[in-house]
RNA sequence: GGAGAGAUGACCGAGUGGUCGAAGGUGCAUGAUUGGAAAUCAUGUGUACCCGCAAGGGUACCGAGGGUUCGAAUCCCUCUCUCUCCGCCA
């Protein structure tokens, strides 16, 4: 959410943000609702002031004065009761519109519509050239006994899978490697609730737009999170954090659930796009300062890259264009890992700065050194998300005989083994 | 799931219909005192929105939402959360 005063004073920039980010919103509607809201509250507050005046005067009034005052007070109350529903309606409409106003991208963010407009920043590592026909992760995992498809898809539906044997072990190893890396880098590990109330979804910017992307637990009005960013940010909802305590660096680990509502028929093969996965996520709160936020943004990006380096996966980093960044994000980098089975770099990480967008929605504040209150900035980035990360991990390290070499950094988490091989062989 | 207790400002805690944004204490800030500190004394110390160049003014907020009343932190209803006991349970 943006500051309405900021919107009033920078309407042009906000209009541009709406257009460039590709949202369907008429800012004039927002501004009109704001004007209407102020008009109705002014009238209402004047009535309330009169009401307070009268109820203060009544106990002091003499016997003969009293009935007259009570009479007027009753009238004023009736007036207020008539104004209130309209004012509430105007307020509701205003707030609903405010939740749909996107944040303004940082100046360095390229204007563009889709992926093709993202700007590649760097490539690290070279895609391997194979002297045999490489298998994709589906074939590899099948032959290595790492995954079950048929059973899960029968009892749990499309995009379901079960990691088994080395598949499950490898997932745990990768997650643990990521966790340890982040702990070494000063982040606090959190295993948060994965079922949350609507407020957490709205507060982090995933609702109301994108509501259809979340699984709802209707009986209890709860929602399954699509990322631990939701509970980690919400953990501080309504808090006032002392500036001296910032930055707060968290590493969240949780299962994540996504309906993939707009992606029917897309990426249906394998483990690339699934409804349930496990993710280690970095979330940081920092002081409201662009310079500080930028520094942390690159720190988070660096953490993700360090993990990819340990996993010995080639990747590239791209600065996402305006059309590819979300409602609240002011800057986003995507890290795309090389996936031989797709012969392409595909997204495995997403690093975002959100400014005070989430803090405002979640009512998270910071007490600044001068005693004033502000809204902290939030940032987040994937550390590792599995099973998606298993795709480049397995495909890049496969051998001609169908076995997979384990990167050195992973071996301690894999019982000291250096290879995954068919158990039958 | 059953029975009960509770939710007040940064914190503790008073307040059961009227001038209560809310006593008192603690903490914090500033000043006095001191060689310096402690102690002491004095003053100040919430947030959001609206109007205003400002000074300042107004409204709302005592877990949330409704209701009663001229008037609600105080009375009534619903909900949320916390705690205790019983049951169930990984």
Image (tube, coloured by chain):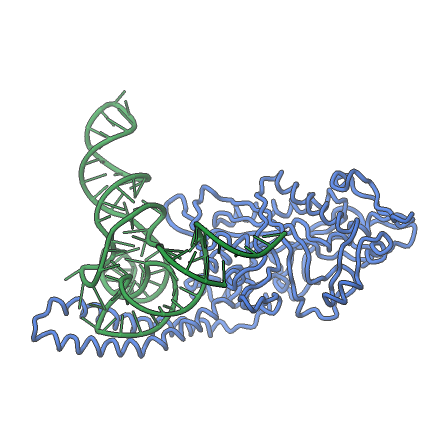
In this view of the protein, which residue sits in the foreground, A147 or A375? A147
Residue at x-position 47% and y-position 62%: A2
| Camera-nearest residue between B19 and B85 | B85
- Residue A141, relative to residue A405: is it above or below? below
For the question of whether residue A279 can be seen, the reply is yes
Count of labels in the image: 0
Q: Position of residue B16 (x, y in %)?
A: 22, 60
- Residue A104 seen in the current view: no
> Of A38 and A367, which appears nearest the observer?
A367
Quick check: A173 above or below A8? above
In the rendered image, residue A142, in percent from the top left (x then y), is placed at 84, 56
Q: Residue at x 55, y 68 (%)?
A: A219
Residue A120: percent from the left, percent from the top? 70, 54
Question: Can you give x and y, in whole percent of width and height, for residue A186 in the image?
Answer: 58, 40
Which residue: 21% across, 77% down? A74
Q: Nearer the viewer, residue A223 or A323?
A: A223
- Colour of chain A, in one word, is blue
Query: As displayed, is residue A308 above or below residue A11?
Result: above
The shade of chain B is green
| Residue B61 located left or right of residue A64 | right
**In screen coordinates, is B6 left or right of A149?**
left
């Amino acid at each position: 959410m943006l500051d309405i005063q900021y919107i009033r004073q920078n309407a042009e920039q906000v209009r541009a943000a709406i257009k460039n980010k590709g949202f369907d919103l008429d800012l004039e509607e927002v501004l009109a609702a704001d004007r209407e809201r102020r008009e109705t509250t002014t009238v209402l507050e004047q009535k309330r002031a009169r009401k307070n005046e009268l109820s203060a005067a009544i106990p002091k009034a003499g016997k003969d004065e009293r009935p007259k005052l009570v009479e007027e007070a009753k009238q004023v109350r009736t007036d207020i009761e008539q104004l209130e529903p309209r004012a509430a309606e105007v307020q509701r409409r205003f707030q609903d519109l405010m939740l749909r106003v996107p944040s303004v991208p940082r100046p360095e963010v390229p204007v563009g519509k889709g992926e093709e407009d993202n700007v590649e920043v760097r490539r690290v590592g070279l895609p391997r050239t194979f002297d045999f026909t490489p298998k994709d992760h589906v074939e590899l995992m099948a032959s290595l006994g790492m995954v079950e498809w048929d059973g899960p898809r029968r009892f749990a539906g499309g995009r379901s899978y079960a990691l088994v044997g080395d598949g499950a072990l490898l997932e745990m190893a990768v997650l643990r490697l990521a966790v340890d890396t982040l702990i070494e880098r000063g982040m606090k590990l959190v295993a948060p609730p994965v079922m949350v109330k609507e407020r957490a979804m709205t507060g982090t910017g995933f609702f109301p737009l994108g509501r259809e992307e979340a699984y709802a637990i209707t009986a209890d009005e709860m929602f399954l999170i699509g990322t631990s960013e939701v509970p980690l940010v919400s953990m501080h909802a309504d808090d006032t954090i002392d500036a001296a305590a910032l930055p707060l660096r968290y590493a969240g680990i949780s299962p994540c659930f996504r309906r993939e509502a707009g992606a029917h028929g897309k990426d249906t093969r394998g483990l690339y796009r699934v409804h349930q996965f496990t993710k280690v996520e970095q979330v940081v709160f920092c002081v409201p300062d662009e310079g500080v936020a930028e520094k942390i943004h690159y720190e988070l990006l660096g953490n993700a890259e360090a993990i990819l380096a340990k996993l010995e996966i080639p990747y590239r980093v791209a600065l996402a264009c305006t059309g590819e960044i979300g409602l609240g994000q002011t800057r986003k980098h995507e890290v795309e890992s090389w996936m031989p089975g797709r012969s392409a770099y595909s997204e495995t990480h997403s690093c975002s700065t959100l400014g005070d967008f989430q803090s405002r929605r979640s009512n998270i504040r910071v007490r600044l050194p001068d005693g004033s209150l502000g809204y902290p900035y939030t940032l987040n980035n994937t550390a590792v998300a599995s099973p998606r990360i298993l795709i480049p991990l397995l495909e890049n390290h496969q051998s001609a005989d169908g076995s997979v070499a384990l990167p050195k950094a992973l071996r301690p988490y894999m019982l000291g083994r250096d290879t995954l091989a068919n158990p039958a062989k």
